[in-house]
Amino acid sequence: MKLQVLLFIMAVPLNLIWEVAQVSAYDFPESNLMKDLIGCFLPSLGDGLMTLMIYWTGWLAFREAKWILKPGFKGYLLMLGTGVILALVVEWNALYRTGAWTYSELMLLVPIVGVVLLPILQMIVLPPTVALLVQRIWINRKQTV
């Protein structure tokens, strides 16, 4: 359980930074840093949950709760694949089912799937980054005890 909490705690702020950095690529009305931070906080919690979903997928696939501490090639591949699928599902749903958001002309649309590149890149880059940070923290925690 501690590992899952650490994953979530590390994922949320990194995703918040990413979300705020890409907010101009969405078609939102007026924007300022405070509104962006507040508006991006909830999606960052969702991104933290998506990171946990990637972790749980690995737990099921590898039958090992601490797989993320030494994911190896297969673990990183699982993170990338699961992250891309989750990003596609969330973006497609928000665009075409719920209309939760729209893109500005700054977004690069991926033609075949009809969603944009930045959220897909987010789920390619950040979960492995979170895993690396958690590995470092977990190892340092064990060494100092």
Image (spheres, grey):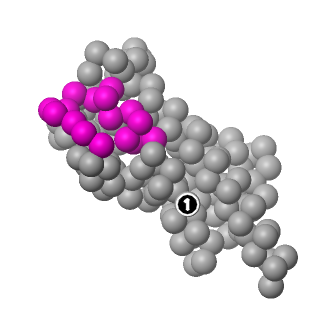
If the image is split into quadrants, where does the N terminus sit? bottom right
* Horizontal and vertical percent position of residue 81: 58, 39
Residue at the far right in the pictured view: 143
Figure check: 48 above or below 113: below
Task: Give me the residue at 44% from left, 29% from top.
Answer: 118
* Horizontal and vertical percent position of residue 112: 41, 17
If the image is split into quadrants, where does the C terminus sit? bottom right
Mark 1 highlights which residue? Answer: 10
- Asked whether the viewer can see residue 51, the reply is yes
Residue at the far bottom in the pictured view: 145
Classify mark 1: residues with Cα within 10 Å, few (<14), some (14-19) or many (20+).
some
Q: Is residue 33 left or right of residue 3?
A: left
Task: Give me the residue at 33% from left, 54% from top.
Answer: 41
State which region is magenta: 18-33
Figure check: 123 above or below 56: above
Q: Is residue 11 left or right of residue 98?
A: right
Figure check: 1 above or below 28: below
* Horizontal and vertical percent position of residue 19: 39, 42
Badge 1 marks a residue whose secondary structure is helix
Q: Is residue 121 left or right of residue 130?
A: left
Name the image quarter holding residue 17.
top left
Instruction: Decide whether residue 27 is among the magenta residues.
Output: yes
Q: In this view, does 4 lie to the left or right of 113?
A: right
Task: Give me the residue at 27% from left, 53% from top.
Answer: 38
Tally of numbered tags: 1
Instruction: Decide whether residue 115 is among the magenta residues.
Output: no
- Asked whether the viewer can see residue 53, the reply is no
Name the image quarter holding residue 45.
bottom left
* Horizontal and vertical percent position of residue 53: 50, 57
Query: Mark 1 is on which residue type?
Result: Met
Task: Give me the residue at 57% from left, 45% from top.
Answer: 126
